């Protein structure tokens, strides 16, 4: 029977000695604050590198079942006692005690471990199976924990380089690390690093295998636990300990289940995660150490809803699918589906997908979104049905002002009216084919300063676009621009009389901060002064600024 192992990335990192309990506790506290994934927190805090997080995550997917965990755990063949000590499951002193008992009784060491309560029947069977799968590290080539696969995963060699080295190894029968060094793919120190990393990951896999001693299932509200019985003669019963979140088991709840080897914990909050462990106590009421810890994640899925587009509407072109998603711990990603096919994924707010309907056939489509949290809970939105229509109808557009043949001067407001069967996306205004302005909000208008163009006939047009990029152009509107010659009077901004604002604007133009319009140049080019009259020289410079300042101060010099 396949046994399920609940193994979290934090526990895997601890099992492999990638970090300390203290570092993990700090990271978990930070995760509560930021709602990030644990691996992201550890990298940001500088505890681990991205590569050091990546490998345990790859191993995690193989630790869902005991059979998978046994298969990936490649390593040099070790004696049973050595395996247990290296994994940290028992101490050297406990091993010595078991060996002394073995010498006395003549039993196999595994049977002694069982009798001493250090291993259960299931754990012993799993470890013996683990030993069968062990082989020489260097000569193994497949599996995620093999040396070559680790070096590929960490980016130190390419897949092609590994394949080449394995091919040469099959002929030379040398160790893979030696072949990689001889081919110049890695340095000797990198081989040692890979083997060290391998041992850390094997320890994590071994710890997962040993977690067979107790298993738990449940959906947070009700959690059913079962464990292997303790075979000691003076056993009196068991106690179940559990706590929520990051709280220590010693600070949680304890239930005495007497001599039962199963228990169901009810009334738990699905909004929280819980840790469970079992202890045995004897007739002297002496309680043993905790079993392995089983974690049941919070079970509440994220809430998710599509806020736009609305249900049953017609759409075309590019449609923005907006999703609202939230979770009591944090949303890790949002997926977008069209007709139940995954089309996009977002890992950060805002959750928006730009859906291009242009290549799609006209017809009905169903939109749906899924939101995930770090515990793997999934929330699904209600579906939204929309109809994709092929919009081939161009907008209608007309210029409403000025009228054809109008004589204009100064600043003129150009206005346009536009409509579309789906919706106008923008309107552009042109003078003699040159774009003046583009607006996407009605009413559509533009203030045109005719002082910036020469006197005479000019042609105005407007273009209107819809979301499908259909475009319509107005008929030409010819107008006559007739601006009287502008006096060099210092009224640079064209507002009221000459004041300090004109002096400031002329100074900005003189030092190159502002580029003058034709109208501003005509008003502000007041110098030099010859015989008491302005003689414009085609530019606004410091001389013009001085004259304008004098005019502001009612100085009689100049104009």
Image (cartoon, helix red, strand yellow):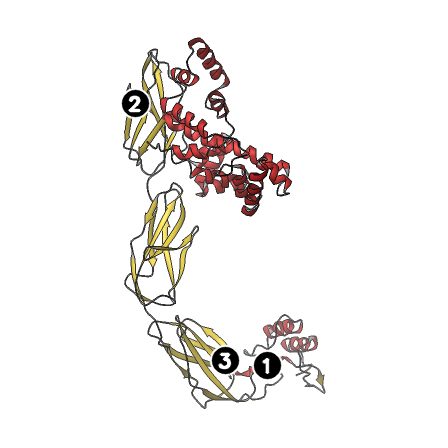
Q: Earlier in the sequence, mark 2 or mark 3?
A: 2
Task: Give the residue at the far top of this rendering.
Answer: 104
Residue 252 visible, this angle: no
Q: Residue at x 44, y 85 (%)?
A: 402
Q: Secondary structure at mark 3?
A: strand
Task: Give the residue at the far front of this rendering.
Answer: 171
What is the quadrant of residue 444 in the picture? bottom left
Within 10 angstroms of label 2, few (less than 14), some, or many (20 or more) residues? Answer: some
Q: Earlier in the sequence, mark 2 or mark 1?
A: 2
Q: Is residue 125 above or below residue 314?
A: above
Q: Are marks 2 and 3 in contact (CB under 8 Å)?
A: no
Left or right relative to 504: residue 71: left
Residue 375 visible, this angle: yes
> Would you name the residue on which mark 1 appears?
518
Q: Position of residue 489 (x, y in %)?
A: 62, 82
Left or right relative to 243: residue 477: right
> Would you name the residue on which mark 2 appears?
261
Q: Secondary structure at mark 1?
A: helix
Q: Earlier in the sequence, mark 3 or mark 1?
A: 3
> Would you name the residue on which mark 3 appears?
448
**C-alpha span from label 2 to label 3:** 87 Å
């Amino acid at each position: 029977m396949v046994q399920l192992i609940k193994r979290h990335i934090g526990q895997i990192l601890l099992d492999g000695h990638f970090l300390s309990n203290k570092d993990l506790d700090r990271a978990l506290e930070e995760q509560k604050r930021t709602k990030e994934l644990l691996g992201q927190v550890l990298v940001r805090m500088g505890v681990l590198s991205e590569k050091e997080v990546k490998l345990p995550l790859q191993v995690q997917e193989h630790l869902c079942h005991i059979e998978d965990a046994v298969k990936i755990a490649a390593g040099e063949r070790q004696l049973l006692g050595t395996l247990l000590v290296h994994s940290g499951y028992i101490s050297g002193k406990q091993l010595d005690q078991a060996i002394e008992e073995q010498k006395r009784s003549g039993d196999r060491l595994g049977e002694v471990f069982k009798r001493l309560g250090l291993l259960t029947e299931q754990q012993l069977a799993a470890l013996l199976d683990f030993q069968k799968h062990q082989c020489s590290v260097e000569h193994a080539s497949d599996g995620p924990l093999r040396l070559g696969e680790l070096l590929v995963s960490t980016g130190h060699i390419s897949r092609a380089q590994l394949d080449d080295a394995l091919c040469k190894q099959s002929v030379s029968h040398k160790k893979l690390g030696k072949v990689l060094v001889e081919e110049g793919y890695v340095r000797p120190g990198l081989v040692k690093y890979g083997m060290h990393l391998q041992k850390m990951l094997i320890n994590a896999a071994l710890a997962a295998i040993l977690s067979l001693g107790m298993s738990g299932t449940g959906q947070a509200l009700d959690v059913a636990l079962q464990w292997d019985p303790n075979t000691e003669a003076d056993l009196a019963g068991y106690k179940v300990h559990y706590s929520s979140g990051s709280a220590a088991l010693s600070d949680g709840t304890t239930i005495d289940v007497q001599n039962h080897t199963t228990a169901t914990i009810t009334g738990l909050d699905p909004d929280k995660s819980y840790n469970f462990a079992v202890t045995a106590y004897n007739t002297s009421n002496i309680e043993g150490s905790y079993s392995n810890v089983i974690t049941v994640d919070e079970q509440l899925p994220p809430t998710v809803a599509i806020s736009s587009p609305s249900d049953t509407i017609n759409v075309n072109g590019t449609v923005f699918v907006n999703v609202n998603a939230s979770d009591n711990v944090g949303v890790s990603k949002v997926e977008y589906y069209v007709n139940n096919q995954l089309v996009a994924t977002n890992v950060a707010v805002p959750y928006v997908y730009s859906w291009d309907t242009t290549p799609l056939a006209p017809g009905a489509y169903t939109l749906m979104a899924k939101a995930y949290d770090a515990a793997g809970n999934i929330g699904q939105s209600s579906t939204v049905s929309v109809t994709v229509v092929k919009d081939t109808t161009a907008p209608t557009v007309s210029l409403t002002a000025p009228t054809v043949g109008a004589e204009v001067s100064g600043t003129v407001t150009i206005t346009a009216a536009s409509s579309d069967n789906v919706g106008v996306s923008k309107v552009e205004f042109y003078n003699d084919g040159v774009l003046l302005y583009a607006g996407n909000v009605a009413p559509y208008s533009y203030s045109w300063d005719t002082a910036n163009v020469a006197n005479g006939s000019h042609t105005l047009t407007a273009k209107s676009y819809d979301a499908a990029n259909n475009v319509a152009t107005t008929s030409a509107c010819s107008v006559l621009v007739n601006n009287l010659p502008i006096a060099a009077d210092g009224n640079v901004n064209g507002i009221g009389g000459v004041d300090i604002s004109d002096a400031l604007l002329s100074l900005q133009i003189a030092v190159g901060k502002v580029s003058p319009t034709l109208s501003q140049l005509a008003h502000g080019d007041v110098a030099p002064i010859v015989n008491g009259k302005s003689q414009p020289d085609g530019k606004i410079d410091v001389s013009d600024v001085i004259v304008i300042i004098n005019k502001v101060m009612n100085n009689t010099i100049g104009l």
